[in-house]
Image (cartoon, grey):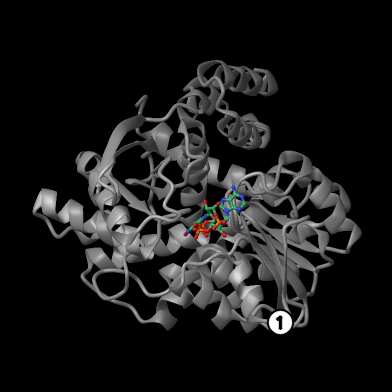
Amino acid sequence: MNVSAHIEAVYAEVQRRNPGEAEFHQAAAEVLESLAPALEQHPEYVESGILERLCEPERQLMFRVPWVDDQGAVRVNRGFRVEFNSALGPYKGGLRFHPSVNLGIVKFLGFEQIFKNALTGMGIGGGKGGSDFDPKGRSDAEIMRFCQSFMTELYRHLGEHTDVPAGDIGVGGREIGYLFGQYKRITNRYESGVLTGKPVGWGGSHARTEATGYGAVYFAQEMLATRGEDFDGRRVVVSGSGNVAVYAVEKVHALGGRVVACSDSTGYLVDEDGIDLELLKEVKEVRRARLSAYAEARPTARFSTRGTVYDLACDVALPCATQNELGREDAVALVKNGVRAVAEGANMPCTPEAVEVFREAGVLFGPGKAANAGGVATSGLEMRQNAARDTWSFEETESRLAQVMRDVHTECRATAEAYGTDADDYVLGANVAGFLKVAEAMQAQGVI
Ligand code: NDP
């Protein structure tokens, strides 16, 4: 059997069946390209069509979300939920509210989520959802009405044993609260485990807000440790200034590093003294203002709309904004300026061309499905606490998160060594390790 030909045929079918879904094609190609060594050892997975089934979501939902704005005008958005794979547990993955959201983006995110969730070892399947709703500039009341309308359709597909959404871009604790309230009202059930990322106090987990950013930094720390290095005294750039970015900055500072830049969709901020975390949180989380407001409040900082954070010299780069934000030229600039490690806090922020530049230059590269797995892992911890009607302390939850990240890192390296030629190949390690867990479960469950 020719494994390469099989993989190419599956990929050609993905392209044919899902026209125009560029991000999904990209995510599928990145995983499929890694899997030849795993399929050579498991020809039974070829025979039982595991790849064909993996690339086709179990269920795709698209629905109308009508709502009324503050002026009384009727608005219509499109809602999505892609329930991709439930071999390992209930579908699990966030909801994204951003005007760029379309079916292809939700499918790329859901596909990634299958392998990421498998890597955490927590018994959760893969899914993702969202809407092309733009929350920017909307009042609290508008956000609430939108969330209520969104959940009025989605609730019938959810359940703590069926499908468990969480946050993503544009969806944080406030939105999860409105979504949960509507779910509870319609179903007449206080089903804590149906959504994760709830505020602490009514079913949320300590450290969930921090988990993705902290986890990405833990992953980078583990990568650096393989070369006898750590964050102490290191210069770091972070992209984005949302949930993942803010807590990546916090953890880098706690480990003795200095984050000198972060960004939003309008530009980037440079603060050579190190980002002032309190000010950043106040601007982004309390005032919900643009990042430029930080520079207005702090004379040592500057805000620029030309170039990117990747133009700056740094030891470590943590892309934490969005897909395909770090291209080949950015990667070349980072390498030229001495970057040693890149860990993806966001999903697929580096283009394949950028990843190739890092690989050729020997830069440690942690792909999102491993490096940002701390968020969903802590959602898994939230589900455990909800199921047991228990609450763990921040310290206990964070120490479990840190252990999950160490385990994911170890598993990626061990798998890369076993199935490839280089333990530093975290892309191969993450893809193959995640795939093997899902494939084994699918194989055992029959042709479903
Ligand atoms: P937030 O909405 O909290 O923040 C997103 C940040 O990225 C903002 O600073 C935003 O800027 C910026 N951004 C978004 N879109 C663009 C764009 N098109 N161009 C430039 N900047 C952009 O989202 P999160 O921090 O939760 O998510 C960030 C990334 O991390 C996403 O890729 C997400 O999928 C991934 N992720 C998140 C997890 C979580 O637990 N939240 C878990 C795992 C991965 P602006 O405000 O100007 O739009």
The answer to whether residue 362 of the structure is visible from this angle is no
As rendered, which of 57 and 245 lies closer to the eye? 245
Question: Which residue is at the far left?
Answer: 188
Q: Residue 123: in sight, yes or no?
A: yes
Q: Report the residue at 54% width, 46% height from top.
A: 434
Q: Is residue 200 left or right of residue 283?
A: left
Furthest residue to the right?
336
Name, please, the residue furthest toward the front.
Answer: 71
What quarter of the picture does the C terminus occupy? top left
In this view, the residue in front, 173 or 11, is: 173
Rendering coords of residue 401 (x, y %): 48, 70
| Residue 32 image position (x, y, % from top left) | 62, 32
Q: Which residue is mark 1?
A: 299
Residue at 79% in and 74% down:
228
Quarter where residue 387 is shown: bottom left
Disc 1 crowd, CA 10 A, few/some/many (<14, 14-19, 20+): few
Q: Nearer the viewer, residue 326 or 127?
A: 326
- Image point (58%, 54%), residue name: 346
